[in-house]
Image (cartoon, rainbow, N blue to C red):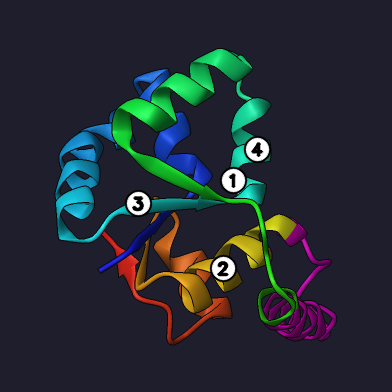
């Protein structure tokens, strides 16, 4: 069972946030159950972390055996586009406000849906609203 990992999980670990408690164990279990993967957008977002350097990121990914999927195919982009368009349409309804989620969240969700078996994230509800068939952890 391949597990895609969201940026917020790794960022929380690096920052020592309370939300990260138990994440290391979940990552370890997911690695044993079938491996870990991040999409290219997660890699890019991690590079923006205040503590990140290219070397630090590469060492972390190597130590945790997280694979980076830099090649996102047409199906991922189409799924992300469809989910983002539906989200924007919902937000344009009267009283719903303006779209606030970043496009990359939709690419990350589409990648997890199509290229992994589940997504390890701290924002499960956000992804479930856009990708109802996506299995999220925890």
Q: Earlier in the sequence, mark 1 or mark 2?
A: 1
As helix, strand or loop, the secondary structure at mark 2 comes to helix
> Circle 2 is placed at which residue position?
111
State the CA–CA distance, disc 2 to disc 3: 13 Å
Q: CA distance from mark 1 to mark 4?
A: 5 Å
Label 1, on which residue?
Answer: 42
Q: Position of residue 35 (x, y in %)?
A: 29, 54
Classify residue 62 by image quadrant.
Answer: top left
Sequence-earlier tag: 2 or 3? 3
Q: What residue sits right under mark 3 in the picture? A: 36
The residue positioned 40% from the left and 24% from the top of the image is: 60
Of badges 3 and 1, the one in the foreground is 3
Q: Can the viewer see residue 29 in this picture?
A: yes
| Label 3 environment density (alpha carbons within 10 Å; few <14, some 14–19, many ≥20) | many
Q: Point out the frontmost of discs 4 and 3.
A: 3
Of residues 133 and 66, the one drawn nearer to the viewer in this rendering:
66
Residue bearing the label numbered 4 = 45
For marks 4 and 2 on the same chain, the one whose residue lies earlier in the sequence: 4
Q: Secondary structure at mark 3?
A: strand
Q: Nearer the viewer, mark 4 or mark 2?
A: 2
Residue sitting at x 41%, y 69%: 116
Pointer 1 with pointer 4, Cβ within 8 A: yes
70 left or right of 123 in image: right
Please determine whether, in this image, residue 101 is positioned above or below residue 91: above
Q: Residues within 10 Å of mark 1 (few under 14, many from 20)?
A: many
Q: Are marks 1 and 2 in contact (CB under 8 Å)?
A: no
For the C terminus, the quadrant is: bottom left
Q: Are marks 2 and 3 in contact (CB under 8 Å)?
A: no
Task: Answer above or below: position of 12 versus 95.
Answer: above
Q: Which residues are magenta?
A: 78-103
């Amino acid at each position: 069972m391949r597990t895609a990992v969201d940026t917020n999980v790794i960022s929380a670990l690096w920052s020592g946030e309370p939300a990260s408690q138990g994440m290391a164990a979940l990552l370890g279990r997911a690695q044993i159950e079938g491996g870990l993967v991040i999409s290219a957008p997660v890699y890019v977002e991690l590079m923006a972390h205040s503590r990140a350097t290219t070397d630090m990121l590469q060492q972390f990914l190597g130590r945790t055996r997280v694979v980076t999927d830099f090649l996102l195919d047409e199906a991922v982009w189409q799924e992300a586009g469809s989910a983002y368009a539906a989200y924007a349409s919902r937000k344009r309804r009267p009283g719903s406000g303006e779209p606030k989620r970043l496009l990359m969240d939709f690419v990350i969700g589409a990648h997890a849906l199509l290229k992994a078996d589940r997504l390890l994230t701290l924002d499960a509800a956000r992804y479930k609203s856009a990708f109802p068939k996506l299995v999220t952890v925890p």
